[in-house]
């Protein structure tokens, strides 16, 4: 993965993690209400799935690079 793509992927993951943190904080905040809780929970769940998928992809890329440079 070229350096710019790696930086963009890392930035994207960081942005998703920050967004997930904001959603989790909402549950502890004064604005929490049950009417919106399900929507926020679903957004958080979807973000966590995306983050896990992105991290797995990065892990695979790192492994490929490690295997490639092993020789």
Image: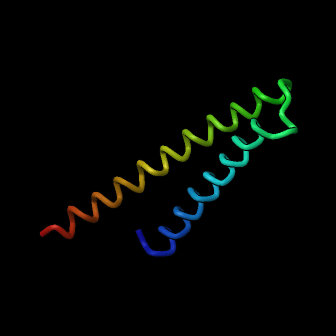
Residue at position x 83%, y 24% in the image: 34
Q: Is residue 34 left or right of residue 9?
A: right
Q: Nearer the viewer, residue 10 or 2?
A: 10
Looking at the picture, tell me which residue is in the foreground, 31 or 5. Answer: 31
Is residue 69 positioned above or below 12 on the image? below
* Quadrant housing the N terminus: bottom left
Give the image location of residue 23, x and y in percent: 72, 43
User: In percent of the image, x 47 and y 68: which residue is there?
Assistant: 6
Q: How many marks?
A: 0
Q: Vertical placement of 8 versus 14: above or below?
A: below
68 w.r.t. 40: above or below: below
In the image: residue 60, left or right of residue 2 = left
Point out the image quarter for the C terminus.
bottom left
Image colouring = rainbow
Determine the residue positioned at 56% across, 56% down: 13
Q: Position of residue 43 (x, y in %)?
A: 70, 37
| Residue 67 found in image quarter | bottom left
In the rendered image, residue 48, in percent from the top left (x then y), is placed at: 57, 41
Left or right position of 55 against 20: left
Q: Residue furthest bottom?
A: 3
Nearer to me, 23 or 4: 23
* Residue 26 position in % (x across, y down): 77, 41
Residue sitting farthest toward the left: 71
């Amino acid at each position: 993965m070229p350096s710019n793509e790696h930086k963009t992927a890392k930035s994207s993951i960081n942005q998703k993690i920050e967004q997930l943190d904001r959603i989790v904080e909402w549950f502890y905040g004064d604005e929490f209400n049950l009417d919106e809780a399900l929507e926020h929970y679903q957004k958080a769940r979807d973000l966590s799935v995306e983050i896990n998928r992105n991290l797995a992809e990065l892990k695979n890329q790192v492994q490929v690079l490690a295997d490639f440079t092993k020789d």
